[in-house]
């Protein structure tokens, strides 16, 4: 049945997570987990939902950008888009005037990603498959047809991508069955936020251990003594037989990152994530080289703006772990390009998921990566942050430290109507109450 996209809405949805310190790090000390939430209405009952992740102020700007991009999608038939998805993606990401605001980065790219993912959600629902399964069932030719290879073909050609995907067909049914029965390995971030005090950190570690997590991440960069204390506390709780990752959220200069991390070696972090500016490809390479003798790898990606910067990170040997985020890159199409480049260079992909809706979205890429691309779980684990899942119609499920593969059609990006209404900024009752009691200031009118 033909499905015509008839309308687009973008809502500014915010959760006051800063009140509890959830999601805090050395740079983003008071994040209010938020998203620009896109709904595509259609000529049928089906709707597409997509969102990008923000941390409070500025979400309204992403919503405006989504409205500006709306004309590329409204009036189109889903089948017309999917027949030339790479062409659609390029048109959306490269409007001759809007691209001046990027190109392929920043606010406009965040809006692009939310719209693109809403289209994929719609497609997956029409096909009655969860997104990971829609991708896993596509032929290698169909998969490469959705990717825009412009700017990356010096590292990965269409033919090479096809070859990787053709290899991925071998044994894919077995890998799919394995994931369905065992789940996908996760690591938990929620014990190590920088805004948590020692007691809360201990408590969260205990809870996570009881739930079966064996991999943890801690924020660093708030101060060397504070970092040493947080890492010591976490190691006391989890022991040294578990994995511990560290995350500086871009806190340092290149040499500062090296010096700082040398002072944390006794805590045996597997990686240091985002040690410096996300745009500093060569800086990451310098840090990676300097920390190699200490067995500390470099990870990055949650702020990596597009496939081009990922390409350079791979080319310069800057990262040992690639942290794609399907709510930062231009949606599924661009994520696929990065998964394939990572596979070519043997860099494990461990998606970023610390943010509202990011576990929902990024889980699908890890499953697809294992089933059809990398074909290995070695050094691969998917981030899990535990809050706000109750706001989704079909929340992610984690059991025994493993993600459970969803079987519901779509991308799992749909939020509950009641959550949307109560958290819409600034009109939702949650926000009106916080303004009235003076906990938050209402936005200024100019
Ligand atoms: C502001 C976010 O919570 C960020 O700290 C998340 C992050 O860096 C991660 O999950 O990794
Ligand atoms: Mg991070």
Image (cartoon, rainbow, N blue to C red):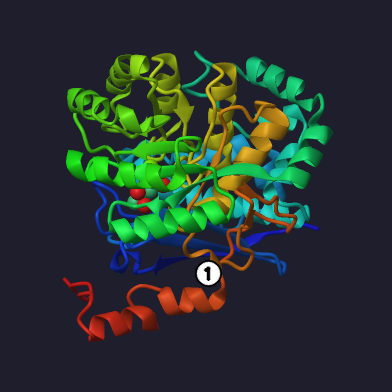
| SS at badge 1 | helix
Near mark 1 (Cα within 10 A), the count class, few <14, some 14-19 or many ≥20, is: some
Taking the spot 31% from the left edge, 83% from the top edge, the residue there is 432
Residue 280, visible in the rendered structure? yes
Taking the spot 55% from the left edge, 76% from the top edge, the residue there is 417
Q: Is mark 1 within 8 Å of ligand 1?
A: no
Task: Point out the image quarter for the N terminus.
Answer: bottom right
Image position of 53 (left or right of 402):
left
Image position of 5 (left or right of 351):
right
Residue 142: quadrant of the picture: top right
> What x and y, as percent, mark residue 410?
68, 56
> What x and y, as percent, mark residue 102?
34, 39
Q: Camera-side residue: 297 or 173? A: 297
Task: Point out the image quarter for the C terminus.
Answer: bottom left
Taking the spot 32% from the left edge, 19% from the top edge, the residue there is 291
> What x and y, as percent, mark residue 398?
62, 54
Residue 60, placed above or below residue 165: below
Image position of 330 (left or right of 442):
right
Residue 70, visible in the rendered structure? no
Q: Which residue is mark 1?
A: 391
Taking the spot 46% from the left edge, 58% from the top edge, the residue there is 356
Q: Camera-side residue: 419 or 238? A: 238
């Amino acid at each position: 049945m033909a499905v015509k996209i008839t309308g687009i809405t973008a809502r500014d949805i915010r959760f006051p997570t800063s009140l509890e310190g959830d999601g805090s790090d050395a740079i983003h000390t008071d994040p209010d987990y938020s998203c620009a939430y896109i709904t595509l209405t259609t000529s049928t009952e089906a709707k597409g939902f997509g969102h990008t992740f923000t941390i409070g102020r500025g979400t309204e700007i992403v919503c405006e950008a989504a409205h500006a991009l709306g004309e590329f999608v409204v009036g189109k038939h889903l089948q017309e888009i999917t027949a030339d998805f790479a062409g659609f993606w390029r048109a959306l990401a490269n409007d001759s005037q809007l691209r001046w605001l990027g190109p392929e980065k920043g606010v406009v790219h965040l809006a692009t990603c939310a719209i693109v993912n809403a289209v994929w959600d719609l497609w997956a629902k029409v096909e009655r498959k969860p997104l990971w399964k829609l991708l896993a069932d596509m032929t290698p030719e169909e998969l490469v047809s959705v990717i825009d290879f412009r700017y990356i073909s010096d590292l990965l050609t269409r033919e090479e991508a096809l070859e990787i995907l053709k290899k991925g067909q071998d044994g894919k049914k077995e890998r799919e069955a394995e994931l369905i029965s065992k789940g996908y390995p996760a690591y938990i971030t929620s014990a190590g936020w920088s805004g948590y005090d020692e007691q809360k950190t201990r408590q969260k570690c205990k809870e996570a251990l009881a739930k079966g997590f064996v991999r943890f991440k801690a924020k660093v960069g708030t101060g060397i003594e504070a970092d040493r204390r947080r890492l010591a506390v976490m190691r006391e709780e989890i022991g040294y037989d578990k994995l511990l990752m560290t995350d500086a959220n871009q806190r340092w200069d290149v040499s500062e990152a090296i010096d700082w991390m040398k002072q944390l070696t006794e805590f045996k972090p597997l990686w240091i994530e985002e040690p410096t500016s996300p745009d500093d490809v060569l800086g990451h390479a310098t840090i990676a080289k300097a920390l190699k003798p200490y067995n500390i790898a470099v990870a990055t990606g949650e702020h990596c703006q597009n496939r081009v910067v990922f390409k350079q990170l791979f080319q310069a040997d800057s990262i040992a772990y690639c942290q794609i985020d399907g709510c930062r890159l231009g949606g599924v199409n661009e994520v696929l390009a990065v998964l394939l480049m990572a596979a070519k260079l043997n860099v494990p992909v461990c998606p970023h998921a610390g943010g509202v809706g990011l576990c929902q979205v990024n889980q699908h890429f890890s499953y697809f990566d294992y089933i059809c691309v990398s074909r290995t779980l070695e050094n691969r684990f998917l981030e899990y942050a535990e809050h706000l899942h109750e706001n989704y119609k079909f929340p992610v499920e984690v059991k025994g430290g493993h993600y459970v593969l969803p079987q519901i059609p779509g991308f799992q990006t749909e939020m509950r109507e009641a959550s949307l209404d109560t958290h819409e900024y600034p009109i939702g009752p949650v926000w009106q109450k916080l303004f009235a009691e003076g906990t938050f200031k209402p936005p200024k009118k100019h």
